[in-house]
Amino acid sequence: MIIEMPETSTNDVAKKMVEIRESGGAISLGRVLTLVVVAEHGEPTEAAVEAAIGASSEHPSRVIVLACGSRKGESLLHAQIRVGGDAGASEVVILSMSGPLADQPHSVVTPFLLPDCPIVVWWPGSAPDDPSADPMGRIGRRRILDASKAAHPESVLERRLATYSPGDSDLAWTQITHWRALLASAIDRPPHTPIQSVVVTGPAQSPGIELLAGWLYSALGVPTTRSIGSFEVRLLREHGATVLSMDQNGNAVISVPGKPDGRVAMTNRDLPVYLAEELRRLDTDEVFEQALRGAVELRQQGQPA
């Protein structure tokens, strides 16, 4: 069920949600968190809404979408409430603001926050320069960003590290989870000779590849090179290299000296899967911070080559 409320107020929207709940249209008692989605003017919101609905099968939540429109004209608030089959296991409130009100999303969202539930703030598009200091970021226990959507991807990781605060995370980091797992598994397999250096190759201006290189650099403590080209991770040892690459079908290929290549079918992961993975943990992701720090250190060394 989708309910449109044009030119409304937060009080009227809140009353309507109570009315829906009391009539049996939605139950909020089972919500495990409040997910606040902040989208600026011109950024598509429907993909973010669909991702939140998809993630709700694993994390039932109240989803509040703040669509900040043009700052011109008078302050207006348009609302849309989605419950039932149109909201998955969540209840979705889309609040579209225009005029001066678009600069006050933190005051608009307050009446809709569930009591005693953790709050996660997600910027599916561009994020503030300092998310934890932003009025919206301050209300969230966890702040989810996406470095691949940054206006200046060539310097986004440096900005993320400069303003990093416990609770920050990034979908660029989530997107390489499977690759990190494969590399950790490959390192645990023979030969158990020390890794002397690492070469990480991938597309230019790819925050995920840079975070992967930073993670290996910080975890292994060996010389690491970030190069431009087709995806490949090469762990150099005395008697040969352990190599992780992709074949023409998109499968992962692990090559170890003296052994046949191993192939792993990689499932297609989309935005709802990434978001669901992020919502599984609300504590500080210390490994992400280390990877971020490692990636910036490689940049300072003149990487990528």
Image (spheres, grey):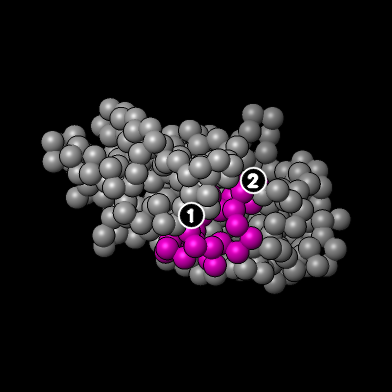
Residue 148 visible in the displayed image: yes
Query: Could you say which disc has been placed on residue 149 in the image?
Result: 2
Q: Quadrant of the N terminus?
A: top left
**Going 65% across and 67% down the picture, which residue do you hit?**
161
Q: Nearer the viewer, mark 2 or mark 1?
A: 1
- Seen from the viewer's position, the closer of residues 236 and 111 is 111
Q: Residue 61 has which mark? A: none
Residue 192 drawn above or below residue 109: below
Q: Quadrant of the C terminus?
A: bottom right
Q: Are marks 2 and 1 in contact (CB under 8 Å)?
A: no
Which x, y percent locates residue 203?
A: 76, 44
Q: Is residue 303 left or right of residue 18?
A: right
Q: Quadrant of residue 304?
A: bottom right
**145 or 97: nearer the viewer:** 97
Q: Position of residue 91 (x, y in %)?
A: 30, 40
Residue 100's x, y, as percent? 52, 49
Left or right of 148: which side holds 22?
left
Q: Residue at x 60, y 37 (%)?
A: 42
- On the rendered structure, is 251 left or right of 296? left
- Let me know if residue 139 is in the magenta part: yes
How far apart are the alpha carbons under marks 2 and 1? Answer: 23 Å
| Residue at 51% in and 42% down | 74
Q: Which residue is mark 1?
A: 104
Magenta range is 122-149
Please state which of residues 282 and 120 is positioned toward the viewer in this rendering. Answer: 120
Q: Secondary structure at mark 2?
A: helix
| Residue drawn where x is 77% and y is 41% of the image | 230
Amino acid at the residue labelled 1: Gln
